[in-house]
Structures are given as structure tokens and as C-alpha cells.
Amino acid sequence: MACTHASTAWSANERNARPALHLPFGSRRAVAAARRPPILGCRAGKLGDKDEMFRYTDVKHASWWVVEADDKRRARLNCVAHLLSMIAYDDLTPPPLELPPRGRGKYVRPPFEEQTFVPQIY
């Protein structure tokens, strides 16, 4: 099978060029993506490569976990829930505190000279 990916010769200036810092963040990302060299190699984009990798590397003592990611939000939540479910932990919730009744006395603030304040820069 012939390789269908186009290869482009990039000069040293184009390869090392950085996007202008005065552009907004999204624009800088777009400029950086436009300057990336194309994917080289015939096997880089084949869909069957993932399945082949799983066939060789998915073993019982070190298996791959696949996340259904059609809905990214649910995929992230499922991933976090799965990771947390794999960690053994004891419930360390303390018992509720019994607080004394609140006093109704008049509050008097201590003198400013006895306190240390954070400097107000802004």
C-alpha cells in the first residue's frame, strides 16, 4: 500500500518559529497548529493500529481500560469515579461536634498594634 501522507520540507526558520505573543491565546494556538509539520509515515493514521496494539499489550496482569468518550463530560466523570473506586480507603468522617450555646456578649476588637497584617499591595 502506498503512503498517502504528504511530506513537506520545513526550513529551520519555519520549524523554530514562535507565534507572536501579542495575539490572543486562541489565535496563538491556531498559528502554532498551522506551523506544525504534517504527520510522516504510512502507519501514523491507520485505525487498526490501536486494535493491534491492544492485542499485543492487553494482558491480564496489566490490562488497558477503555473509556467511552462520546460525551466528554461523562467520560471524565466515569474515569475519575473508576480511579477512586480502585483505591481502598476507610471512612474518616468525624462524628458531629456538640457546640456550646453562642454567647451574646459585645465584641471588642483588639488594638491594631497587637495584630500583624498582610501588606495591601492592590
Image: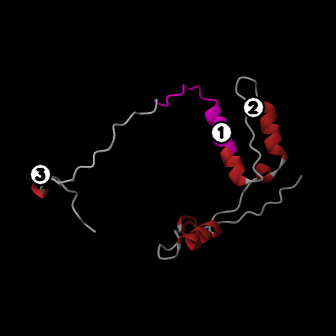
- The nearer-to-camera label among 3 and 1 is 3
Q: How far across and down, in percent of the image, does residue 78 sit?
A: 69, 43
Q: State if disc 3 and disc 2 touch (CB < 8 Å).
A: no
Q: Residue at the spot x=34%, y=40% of the render?
A: 101
Which label is found at residue 57? Answer: 2
Name which quarter of the figure residue 6 lies in. bottom right
What is the span of residues highlighted in magenta in the rendered image? 78-94
Rounded to the nearest whole Å, what is the CA distance between mark 2 and mark 1? 24 Å
Task: Say what amino acid the circle numbered 1 marks.
Answer: Ala
Camera-side residue: 76 or 45? 76
Q: For mark 1, what is the residue?
A: 81
| Left or right position of 22 against 114 | right
Task: Say what amino acid the circle numbered 3 marks.
Answer: Glu
Camera-side residue: 41 or 96? 96
State yes or no: residue 90 in magenta: yes
Q: For mark 3, what is the residue?
A: 114
* Residue furthest left as drawn: 113
Circle 1: is it few (<14), some (14-19), or many (20+) Cα within 10 Å? few
State yes or no: residue 65 in magenta: no
Check disc 2 and report its element: helix, strand or loop: helix
* Residue furthest top as drawn: 61
Rounded to the nearest whole Å, what is the CA distance between mark 2 and mark 3? 66 Å
- The nearer-to-camera label among 2 and 3 is 3
Circle 3: is it few (<14), some (14-19), or many (20+) Cα within 10 Å? few
Vertical relation: 119 (above or below) 99: below
Q: Quadrant of the C terminus?
A: bottom left
Circle 2: is it few (<14), some (14-19), or many (20+) Cα within 10 Å? few
| Left or right position of 17 against 69 | left
| Left or right position of 1 against 89 | right
Q: Residue at the spot x=67%, y=66% of the render?
A: 9
